[in-house]
Amino acid sequence: MTLAPTKINNKNSVYIRKVHTNIKKIDTPFLEWLTGFVDAGGNFNISLRNYSSQDNKYNSLILTFQIGLNLDDLEVLKFIQKKLGCGKISISKNKCNFFVNDQASLINIIVPVFNFVPLKSSKYFQFLIFEKAVTLIKSKGHLTDRGRNEMIKFYHEIKNPSIYLKASPALSPINKYWLGGFVDGDGSFSAHLNRPVFKFENHVKELPLFKAIVNYFQFGNINTYKTRNNSSQVVTIEFNNIHFLKNVIVSLFTRIKLLNSKNLKDFNYFCILVDIYYYGYHTIPEGKSLAIEITSNWNNFRFSTYKTPFIDFKKKYQILSNIPSPFVIKDGGLRFYRNTLNLVSDKIRITAIDHLNNVAIFSSISECSRILQIDRATIKKYLLNGQIYKNYRFKFNNFIYFDRKEG
């Protein structure tokens, strides 16, 4: 079956017309998700059969777009295959692979899709080389001596990671659907010392992309380090601020269906762990015990090879939540110990406004105290009562607001 050229609607959809079939609509949110997923774990490959570097010749070539996953994520590949209307899936032991290598699908579906929604990672450059190779095949240029030499050039370029380190991706704006795909492929919902952590980790060549993620959230710090064997450098973003996790990450990923992989199961446990710490249940034996139980079983239930009976952590948390929470949330996000006026020792940002309406923002009460030479207890007192002290009015600036409207 041959494919007619892809028709693109720049407002909200890509339409793919197959001969003898109706027009199939692929919604843009899926394509944004797919782009994020491919940025995390997809590949564009040029394979030259019987290539001889000495003679600079090859017998035949195969161009392949592929995504490889653990077998437990087979349903995700079926989801992608159904949405795109092309490609095949192979299974080997505990691995599954979605791949597209027929010329019609590469020309009419894969290349138009990633031109319509550009990749944002170093895969962008890989795709540009791949697109040139597809275009060469489309024009039959690969059948000429000059075209064969061009294909060999593309073959070497696409396998050379150094090309990605010499340039920055042409990043288009990140949105929530792209983020969902990237989280499915590269993000992790986990814990450190039983405390919830949301994390990204990748090769340092993705530093521009990680900066874009931090800019999207207007929150987070980027770190780089070398692996143990010093073979490569890694870039990470780690979010462990409980207010950010509760009010941004949990809120975002529960409000809209953004996750499609087995990461969704991790996220469901993550939400429970966030609530345990946000409401202070980790300070009582029952909550601490449940947090330990969740983190000790974190990855087990999402793998089919794990045979231990399923534990319903949602039900266990419902029982736990019948106990009055140790922390009470007031004033849009401030946490107090129950039945007291004592603030939970969060890292609270403070805004100080003087009598001339000059505004100074401090990262903590301690920093405010040190710079303004006012003791911490006094600052806390006037933060709570809202009165003026030494020409300063103090306000909490701890509320993390995130409600970006996206088309």
Image (cartoon, rainbow, N blue to C red):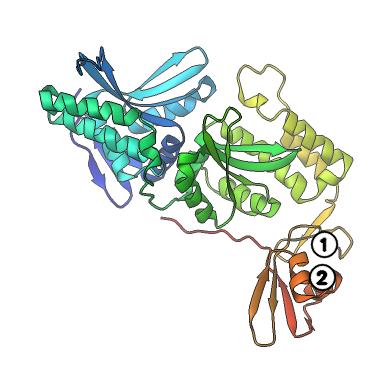
Can residue 283 be seen in the rendering of this structure? yes
Q: Secondary structure at mark 2?
A: helix
Q: Is residue 194 left or right of residue 64?
A: right
Instruction: Report the disc number at residue 343.
Output: 1
Q: Earlier in the sequence, mark 2 or mark 1?
A: 1
x, y percentage for residue 174? 44, 50
> Residue lying furthest bottom in this view?
356
- 363 or 179, which is in the foreground? 363
* Amino acid type of the residue tagged 1 in the rendering: Leu
Q: Which image quarter: residue 391?
A: bottom right
Q: CA distance from mark 2 to mark 1?
A: 9 Å
Q: Is residue 233 left or right of residue 339?
A: left
The crowd level at tag 2 (other Cα within 10 Å; few <14, some 14-19, many 20+) is some
x, y percentage for residue 303? 61, 22
The C terminus, quarter of image: bottom left
Q: Residue at x 76, y 38 (%)?
A: 193
- 351 or 226, which is in the foreground? 226
x, y percentage for residue 356? 65, 87
Tally of numbered discs: 2
Q: Are marks 2 and 1 in contact (CB under 8 Å)?
A: yes
Q: Residue at x 73, y 62 (%)?
A: 348
- 301 or 26, which is in the foreground? 301
x, y percentage for residue 273? 72, 41
Residue under label 2: 380
Can residue 259 be seen in the rendering of this structure? no
